[in-house]
């Protein structure tokens, strides 16, 4: 029987479908993630509660209890409070992870997740960085400390099978809620771990020394800042559509900051209006500074951060130091690793951007964190916790200290020299010498070469040659080091500057410069194994912007007088980095870092959020390096054992 064309096509389609059907029928191999989710679903029972606060407001809380919890087998509670949602909602829908890692779920804890006041399924009004009330006169005086206290009190009294001990942890905003929850600790709160905690939004997240973090604030509040008039179980996160992958171009085309609301937000983002209304460090921001209130903490504390956290590096460093000062005698440990935001949980910590750390740096931390909670909540063996467990970048090793910064450090200054030099000796010139560049708001210096509308993943360790080769970036560097140089602790920039404008930003970057030929590395281009030739790489160690108008006061800005030599001094967040022998120490100075930091118009206006197009002008900036005006970077040097 002859085969028609139609019949032939049917046979071809059947033949093609055969392998596909066979492949579809083949069972999929379970992944570690799916196995973890399956373990949770089969070993835990989920409950949903509406927990009443002292003022009557009810906060939605999802609780996962081990199936074998009973009067004879009790488990501690591990609490996370979040503004981001405790989804999935519904008793039959389970989270795919409960603890910081799967070890917690297999060891057994009662996991509690709470929508904070005014978010998602919880009642009440949400307030960003709700101010803490140091004095409370009645049940209407609530804050995040009282909400945490009331939650813990309810959980230990009402959740069956708990052992009366509670731990709390969270990263970023949940880290802030963990810090706040430790204030006036509930007796049942035995251990808390604020991780990348927000401390003060004039230095964390939204600002750096008052300079506005444009890309983070715009992207975050365009979604997070949308109103929620009533409780909702919606699990959607609607990201802003920039219409391009090029964030630098998008934010440049945005123009003055006033266009953000008129073009995109349409008055719907209430906190954006707060940002616009409070450009200076006034009572609005001061009341949201949690640090002065970190008192009466009874729980053991494990404060965690990442050296390369572009959002919250100020927070963990200052939170640890403040807890140490205001709560003498408690257990308080600082852990700082070579990680981006939350990288200690989301990555193995082997590398970031243009930096390679040589091994999986998160492993030691995750073991320590688990031992911390198990000891305080389940009576496990006491871990050997140092005061500070910190990763030394450059040397790529963990170090333990009994204080942070280490007691052994000595202060030194790196002074700017002629012809781009950098040394410990102050400049000798009695003449007024300086370096000059043109800062043009229409062509700001990019903070990264990565093409993205969000955060560049590895910009905090990115090769800075792209910036060093621009005419609006000043470069100073030492001769090749004869021996290793370790810096440990905060930095302080002291610049003597002038400008032809009336306002200016100053960005100072500390950079580690490789020698041209690295020992053991590829000799030409990339080698056959794909190993990159990192000769002469300029690896960013730390960068910090400063809005010059705040040089004398963060609450009362003032303009520069054109042409007048002025001192600008500001503290830069801690580093712990070793510049190896043969390397050079480099400092770069520039006046834009876009779109990480919004453009300074360089014409002083009372409120940069209200600047007009005509306010954005080119200006000549000078950085002085004379005996009378010696620009420098103060560093803390940790001597080596044989020094």
Image: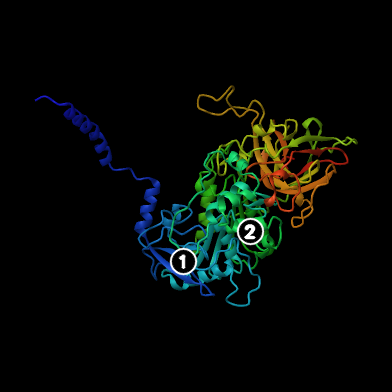
Residue pictured at 67% horizontal, 63% vertical: 287
Q: Residue at x 41, y 56 (%)?
A: 95
Residue 637 visible within the image: no
The numbered disc on residue 346 is none
| Residue at screen point 58% across, 71% down | 142
The quadrant of the rendering that contains the C terminus is top right
Percent x, y of residue 244: 53, 39
Q: Is residue 600 left or right of residue 429?
A: left
Q: Residue furthest left?
A: 1
Number of other residues with Cα within 10 Å of mark 1, as a class: few under 14, some 14 to 19, many 20 or more: many
Location of residue 59 with respect to 508 vertically, above or below: below
Hey, which quadrant is residue 566 in on the image? top right
Front in this rendered view, residue 451 or 525: 451
Q: Position of residue 3 (x, y in %)?
A: 14, 26
Image location of residue 413, percent across then percent down: 79, 42
Residue at the top extreme, as displayed: 524
User: Which residue, as the protein is rendered here, is positioned at the far bottom?
Assistant: 138
**Residue 385 visible in the current orientation:** yes
Among numbered discs 2 and 1, the one appearing first in the sequence: 1
Q: Which residue is nearer to you in this view: 381 or 482?
A: 482
* Relative depth, front residue between 317 and 547: 547
Residue under numbered circle 1? 60
Judge from the rendering whether residue 331 lies leftward or rightward of residue 112; answer left or right. right
Q: Name the image quarter holding residue 510.
A: top right
Q: How is the image coloured?
A: rainbow
- Callout 2 secondary element: helix
**Residue to which mark 2 is pinned:** 274
3D distance between C-alphas at marks 2 and 1: 27 Å
State if disc 1 and disc 2 touch (CB < 8 Å).
no
């Amino acid at each position: 029987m002859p085969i028609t064309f139609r019949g032939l096509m049917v046979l071809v389609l059947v033949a093609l479908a055969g392998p596909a059907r066979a492949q579809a029928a083949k069972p999929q191999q379970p992944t570690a993630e799916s196995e973890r989710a399956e373990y949770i679903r089969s070993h835990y029972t989920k409950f949903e509660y509406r927990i009443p606060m002292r003022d009557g407001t009810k906060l939605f809380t999802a609780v996962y209890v081990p199936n074998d919890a009973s009067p004879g087998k009790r488990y501690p509670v591990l609490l996370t409070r979040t503004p981001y949602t405790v989804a999935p909602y519904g008793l039959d829908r389970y989270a795919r992870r409960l603890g910081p890692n799967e070890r917690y779920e297999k060891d057994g804890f009662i996991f509690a997740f709470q929508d904070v006041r005014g978010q998602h399924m919880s009642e009440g009004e949400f307030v960003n960085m709700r101010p803490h009330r140091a004095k409370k006169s009645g049940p209407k005086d609530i804050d995040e400390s009282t909400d945490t206290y009331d939650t813990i009190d309810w959980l230990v009294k009402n959740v069956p099978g708990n052992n009366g001990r509670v731990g709390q942890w969270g990263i970023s905003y949940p880290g802030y809620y963990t810090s706040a929850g430790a204030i006036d600790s509930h007796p049942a709160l035995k251990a808390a771990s604020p991780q990348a905690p927000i401390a003060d939004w004039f230095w964390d997240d939204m600002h750096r020394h008052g300079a506005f973090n444009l890309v983070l604030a715009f992207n975050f509040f365009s979604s997070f800042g949308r109103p929620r008039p009533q409780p909702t179980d919606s699990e959607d996160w609607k990201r802003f559509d920039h219409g391009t992958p090029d964030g630098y171009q998008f934010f440049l085309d945005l123009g003055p900051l006033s266009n953000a609301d008129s073009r995109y937000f349409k008055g719907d983002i209430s906190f954006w209006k707060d940002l616009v209304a409070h450009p200076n460090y006034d009572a609005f921001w001061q009341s949201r500074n949690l640090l002065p209130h970190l008192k009466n903490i009874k729980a053991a504390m494990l404060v965690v951060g990442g050296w390369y956290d572009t959002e919250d590096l100020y927070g963990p460093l200052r939170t640890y130091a403040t807890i140490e000062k205001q709560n003498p005698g408690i257990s308080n440990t600082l852990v700082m690793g070579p990680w981006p935001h939350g990288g200690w949980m989301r990555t193995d910590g082997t590398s970031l951007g243009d930096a390679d750390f040589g091994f999986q740096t998160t492993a030691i931390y995750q073991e320590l964190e688990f031992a911390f909670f198990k000891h305080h909540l389940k009576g496990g063996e006491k871990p050997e916790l140092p005061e500070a467990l910190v990763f030394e970048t450059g040397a790529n090793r963990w170090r333990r200290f009994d204080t942070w910064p280490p007691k052994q450090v000595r202060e030194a200054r790196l002074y700017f020299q002629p012809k781009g030099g950098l040394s410990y000796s102050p400049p000798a010139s009695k003449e007024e010498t300086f370096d000059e560049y043109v800062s043009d708001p229409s062509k700001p210096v990019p903070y990264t070469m990565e093409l993205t509308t969000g955060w560049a993943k590895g910009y905090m360790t990115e090769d800075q040659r792209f910036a060093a080769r621009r005419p609006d970036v000043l470069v100073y560097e030492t001769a090749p080091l004869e021996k290793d140089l370790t810096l440990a602790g905060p930095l302080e920039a002291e610049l003597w500057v002038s400008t032809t404008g009336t306002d200016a930003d100053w960005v100072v970057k500390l950079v580690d410069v490789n020698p041209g030929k690295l020992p053991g590395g590829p000799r030409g281009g990339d080698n056959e194994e794909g190993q990159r030739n990192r000769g002469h790489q300029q690896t960013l160690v730390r960068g910090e912007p400063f809005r010059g108008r705040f040089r004398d006061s963060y609450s009362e800005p003032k303009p520069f007088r054109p042409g007048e030599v002025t001192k600008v001094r500001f503290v830069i967040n801690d580093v712990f980095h070793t510049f190896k022998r043969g390397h050079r120490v480099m400092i770069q100075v520039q006046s834009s870092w876009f779109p990480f930091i919004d453009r300074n118009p360089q014409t002083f206006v009372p409120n940069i959020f209200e600047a007009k197009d005509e306010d954005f002008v080119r200006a000549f900036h000078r950085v002085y390096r004379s005996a009378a005006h010696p620009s420098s970077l103060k560093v803390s040097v940790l001597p080596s054992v044989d020094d």
